[in-house]
Amino acid sequence: MRKVYLDYTSTTPCHHLVIDAMKELWGEKYGNPSSFHSFGREARALLDNSREIIAHAIGAHPSEIIFVSGGTEAINYAIKGISQKIIGEGKNHIITSATEHSAVLETVAYLNNQRFDVTRLRVGEDGLIDLDDLRSAITNKTGLISIMHVNNETGVIHTVEEISSIAKERGIIFFSDSVQSFGKIPVNVSSGADLLSFSAHKIYGPKGIGALFVRRGLDIEKYFHGGGQERGRRAGTESVPLAVGFGRAVELFKESFDDKNKLITRLNEMLLKLLQNKFHYIIINGNRKLSVPHIVNISFDSNKINMDGDALLYNLDLDGIAVTSGSACSTGTLKPSHVLMAMGRNPETARASLRISIGNQTSEEDIIYFVDRLELIVKRIGKQI
């Protein structure tokens, strides 16, 4: 049976050159980077080299990069760490959006149960926040704005430069979750964000490592306590193999960034054209002019067709096709996507949704096979109204 993977947004296969870069570090170059002897110094040099690669990719200084276990830890570190700073300044108000990743929403919900007030900005049908709503939500108690760069379900791109400018005008710290934008579109600290989160396994690197950018001069409460690793900001022995793999993955996407983006954009256009030609009862979710090319999110309009979303995913899987209905972190829940609900979809339409994400290994044949099988499945299990 043909296998078609269209779930690159949840994770990507580790590049074979990344695997090669990590291999010898598991058994031959095993020093602790905090040790003074030659084994440790060798490990430290490798760790620092990867830090420099990642910093250079976003226009940062290496000292501004903290290695963490992944995107979720980076998000928790950024929000909880800054919350302790702002509460000491008499500020206890956080602004975010209703369509953030669950790692952001769960973290601010936790703080909401502590001493913090949280405003979750609504989004329009296109998935974007209204900047006037952001300005109106700011009070003299606002200490943090957390708005993601690219939405992980719809691919919508938020204008981080404009958001950053609004934050700076009011002396507010701005954090932007960049897990879905890094390696897909340009990400640079010149945007003005004070904190950015990244994850290696979204860019053909290894699972289990990510990074947090913290702008120099910004005081942030440490998230893990213990030793003095990561300049005293994140205790725990660093994983040199994973850091090297992360750095190699960054080098690889920089080498082929333009060519890969052109390919993925062409496949995106092909996919959208085929879907719109074959299905008159689907909704393309999100602002297509302000979105990344590797994510396409569609819903079957419940006003035009009855569609069981679980059955749809199950039948696609039986045909060897891997797609999801939303964030991989929410898989297994019976609730409709909070992102699509926030964009105005009714529960039935939101449940009958697919997130199709294109990657470096996707081919035209994969796209054609997916749409052909989807058409057959919809005819079999859908009931047009």
Image (spheres, rainbow, N blue to C red):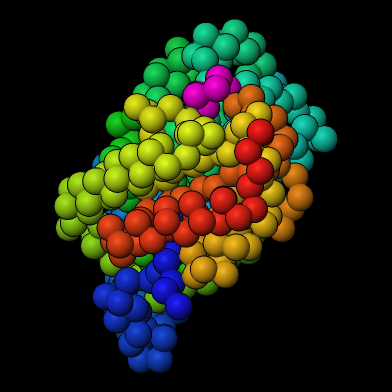
* Residue farthest bottom in this picture: 28
Q: Is residue 26 left or right of residue 236?
A: left
Q: Is residue 178 magenta?
A: no
Nearest the eye: 141 or 20: 20
Tell me where residue 138 appears, x and y as whole percent: 60, 13
Whether residue 317 is situated above or below residue 53 in the rendered picture: below
Q: Is residue 167 left or right of residue 142?
A: left
Residue at 49% across / 14% down in the picture?
131
Tell me where residue 81 appears, x and y as whole percent: 61, 42
Main SS, magenta region, reads loop
Whether residue 349 is situated above or below residue 274 in the rendered picture: above
Q: Quadrant of the C terminus?
A: top right
Is residue 289 something that shows in the picture? yes
* Residue farthest right in this picture: 113
Tell me where residue 322 appears, x and y as whole percent: 50, 63
Q: Quadrant of the N terminus?
A: bottom left
**Total label count?**
0
Nearest the eye: 148 or 377: 377
Q: Examine the image and state in which quarter residue 293 appears.
A: top left
Q: Examine the image and state in which quarter residue 149 appears.
A: top left
Residue at 75% across / 45% down in the picture?
335
Residue at 50% across / 24% down in the picture?
126
Nearest the eye: 321 or 216: 321
Q: Is residue 127 magenta?
A: yes
Is residue 209 something that shows in the picture? no
The residue range painted magenta reads 123-128
Whether residue 199 is situated above or below residue 302 in the rendered picture: below
Whether residue 299 is situated above or below residue 41 in the rendered picture: above
